[in-house]
Image: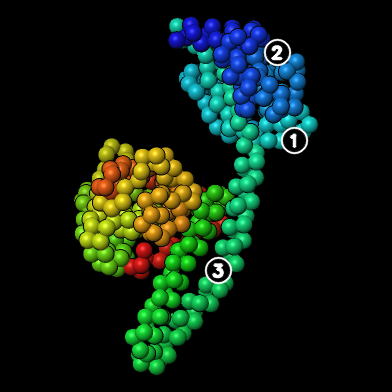
Amino acid sequence: MAKEISQIVIDISKRTDGGNPFHRASESAFNHFIITDPDAKIVYANPAVARITGYSLEEIIGNRPSLWGGLMGKEFYQEMWNTIKIKKQNFSGEITNRRKNGEEYVSKVIVSPILDEKHKILGYIGTEEDITLHKEIDKLQSDFISVAVHQLQTPLTGINWSLELFKGFEDFANLSDQQKDAIEMLEKSSDHLHDLVSILLNVGRIESGRLTVKPELTNIKEFVDIISEELQGSIKNKEIEFIKDVSDDLPEINLDRKLVRELIANLLSNAIKYSHPKGKVVVKISQEENDIYFLIEDNGLDITKDQQHRIFDKFFRGDNARKEQISGNGLGLYFAKSIVEICGGKIWFETVENKGSKFFFTLPVSGMEERKGDVSVTPMRLNGQV
């Protein structure tokens, strides 16, 4: 394999007649593609490099990628070179570069070492995908959502205040059943809107890095019991069999309780929501070496194979959920994944057709690290209506 790769380097860098299939693919590729020698001097660059960076191929060949790079912090480049030169592994990440005209742009970059049979580095292959426009669109979307959410907060507060005031009137008990049902529907709608506003705010805070993380020593078993109790209304409404299997010898660990509450509440709420009436939800928590393992299992809707890779994407909702007209905003699992990553853990899932799904996540026994910010998480309302 190494011999084939080294031959590809020679062929692509030296042949210009278009006879090499790799040469043809590289020349027509939309993304930038370069090959360097072991000293990072460029021996081949496809036309996309010139189009993206603004430098001519004559200026690029024989130069180094620092011609358009070098804008990232020292730690970024140290990590990259440690990965590709010392560990001899692939490196990927987002990088800010500068075009010849001085304009900065953002790319997804992948750099791979080319190795011979003795694991010696022959050179490097680098690809870049210009994602500047995608980043700008994401920012516009986030800015719009932020403005919309903050505009919703004021009328939502007024609605909740009016409902509480109305329920305090002496004549409230004399309302007809139909009138009481209308008030209950207003409360449910208000709670649903509150949770939507909350998760939008929380996602924005995480993405902007503004979220405060304040860990405190937590008894996980007691903590999960409290969250489960808050969800009893929705459990009873759907007649769910709710099973908890929590190890008695779990250590107390430092967690930001507000943040982890949202993580567990989101996954439990999903399990209940997507379970069939009279279904079953299982929660298992145990310690395995340096991690606390969580399993939340339901026997409701599965996730179709062709959509499983998108399950943690922002605003994604599966076709099964849409078909069954189950309410949702496509943010719960994205938010849960973001929290797990802040905690230093991992999250994954398994799903079986017509048998439901299992969501797993880990939290390190070492606990969470404190992080300074200017806002904390806004909690969901777990009042039995999920």
Question: Does residue 308 show up?
Answer: yes
Residue behind mark 1: 103
Crowding at dot 1, Cα within 10 Å, few <14 / some 14-19 / many 20+, comes out as few
Report helix, strand or loop for mark 3.
helix
Q: Are marks 1 and 2 in contact (CB under 8 Å)?
A: no
Nearer-N-terminus badge (3/2): 2
Report how far apart the C-alphas of labels 1 and 2 lie in the structure. 23 Å
Report how far apart the C-alphas of labels 3 and 1 lie in the structure. 38 Å
Residue behind mark 2: 62
Q: Nearer the viewer, residue 202 or 323?
A: 323
Q: Position of residue 214 (x, y in %)?
A: 46, 54
Q: Position of residue 321 (x, y in %)?
A: 38, 54
Question: Does residue 80 show up?
Answer: no
Which amino acid type corresponds to the residue marked 1 in the rendered image? Glu
Specify the quadrant that holds the N terminus: top left
Horizontal side of 197 relative to 143 (left or right) equals left
- Residue at image point 49% right, 82% down: 162
Specify the quadrant that holds the C terminus: bottom left
